Amino acid sequence: MKKRVLATLLAGFLCVSALAGCGGGSAPAEGSAKTGGTDSTEEGGSATAEGEIYEVVIQFPTLGDTPQDLPLVEEALNKITEPEIGVHVTFYPSSAFELNNTTTMMVSSGEKLDLAMCMFEGGAQSYVNKGMLIELDDLVEQYGQDILEAEGTAMAGGYYNGTLYTIPTEEKMGRVKAFECRKDLLDKYNIAYDEEKVYTLEELTEIFEIIKTGEGEKFYCIAANANEDAPYTYFAEADLLGSDYGSGVLMNYGKGTNEVVNYFESDEFAEYCDVMRTWFEKGYFSSDCNTTTDSSLVQLQSGNYFGMFSNAEPDMVVSHSATMQAYAQTDVVALRTTMPASRSQDYQVTQWMIPITCDNPEKTMQFLNMLYGRKDVINLIYWGIEGTHYLRTEGTENVVEFPEGIDRSNTPYAAILNVWGDKLKDYVMAPNDDGYVAMMQEFNNSISQEYTSDALGYCFNSDPVKAQFAAVNDVVTQYAKSTLGYGVVDPGPQLEEFRSALKAAGIDDIIAENQKQYDVWKEAQAAQ
């Protein structure tokens, strides 16, 4: 899951490699404060005395390599934060693939850490259950007005057991799934398309049949690989309740139902398995689709594939289209497979947490709020120093470009994983333009209440059934994420075998526990 989402985030950078390993930054200095030359405000709490500046140690997620000029950006940032809010920022580079281990080890050992990133973990419940996090409700109310304004609906992803523990970093108030495909082939075979409608499995099958017949045996319709989510996740109209498919879901986008059900027992999943088997047998998938580790985007760039399943919010479509333009000289069309919807899982991808190792949560929250409210701060961390790491594009308000001789491959500074505050305040690079923000706002406004889950703010605590939870997820990986998920086996006997294995692993116990927790949460919501 981590590799899939990281590859998606990197699509806009025309890069899909992911380097494992821990960031090589030095540990922050001991102690919680640095003496500063300016007086701080007294809003920061008792841990910051007049004349002192509080040091905020914040994780800087990387893909293994620390940016060469990170110290320069840190220095420039502190010229803003020290006089304005009495905070000195120390970046702690950490590999995105090791964030969980890094955070757990630092907090367990009592090492100073003020802001930690929860990335691709489906929420921060594991940290909460270990007593590692500070509650944020009062802090956000007092110091987080820019956070609340930027995140809006997405704040629902930060709650656990009715308490706010994390701050999401979302500019998109929902998600829409799609099959992104080559426009040149749609045009070649005179296939009409509508980017506003939702395509069924049957409708996609008809399109694939035309493309496969025309392009021949060695051409495949669907790029997929073993590290990515199986295609069923791009058709499921389910709310995962802050967890995943193995712990029970609400169907119908989480709207109008309070029954937590086993998604894999649904007619929807059974139909999906039958169609995937047909697709595999007809050669729409490659024969190694469930074992290859080449990313779908790289496969698509080879010219031997028609499309890939992906999220299709405006930024994703633009970035994938740019990649295809660069590699295959064709535009991308997104054929939606779900409606634009707001569900609990949409706001738990990247989130900031304040661990118990933070001595001054008030000052830390002030700094975090600045990350969401200050355009200059956000772009300093994201793009670096103007004139050194980027240039403003003449005649535009928000478009930037690299200085001469610098590109994505050799820039001395890049915050490749953009987790920094309100992303609608980011500068953008071509092919995006000044219309980007309006485009994203239009998408956010297009999400209707009909497709906004009733479960926003709920997050399942799997701790009471953690043994069953682990066993069920192993079964899901064995069947749904490999064989059945890609049609490489006949679903006739395999589907029933899969369902039986889920029951043996304890899925009914998990769903019962999820239902119990959800009912309690709903009662509490009704009482408010």
Image (tube, rainbow, N blue to C red):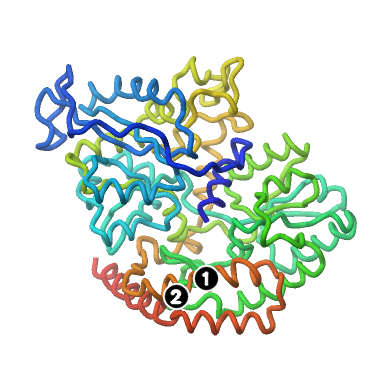
Task: Report the front residue among 323 and 343.
Answer: 323
Marks 2 and 1: in contact by CB < 8 Å? yes
**x then y, percent, for residue 527:** 24, 70
Image-based side of 151 in relation to 392, left or right: left
**x then y, percent, for residue 235:** 61, 65
Which image quarter holds the C terminus? Answer: bottom left
* Residue at 38% in and 57% down: 123
**x then y, percent, for residue 129:** 27, 62
- Residue beneath disc 2: 257
Crowding at label 1, few (<14), some or many (≥20) Cα neighbours within 10 Å? some
- Residue beneath disc 1: 252
**Element class at badge 1:** helix
Crowding at label 2, few (<14), some or many (≥20) Cα neighbours within 10 Å? few
Q: Amino acid at mark 2?
A: Thr
Q: Amino acid at mark 1?
A: Asn
Can you tell which mark lies on residue 105? none
Report the Cα–Cα distance between label 1 and label 2.
Answer: 8 Å
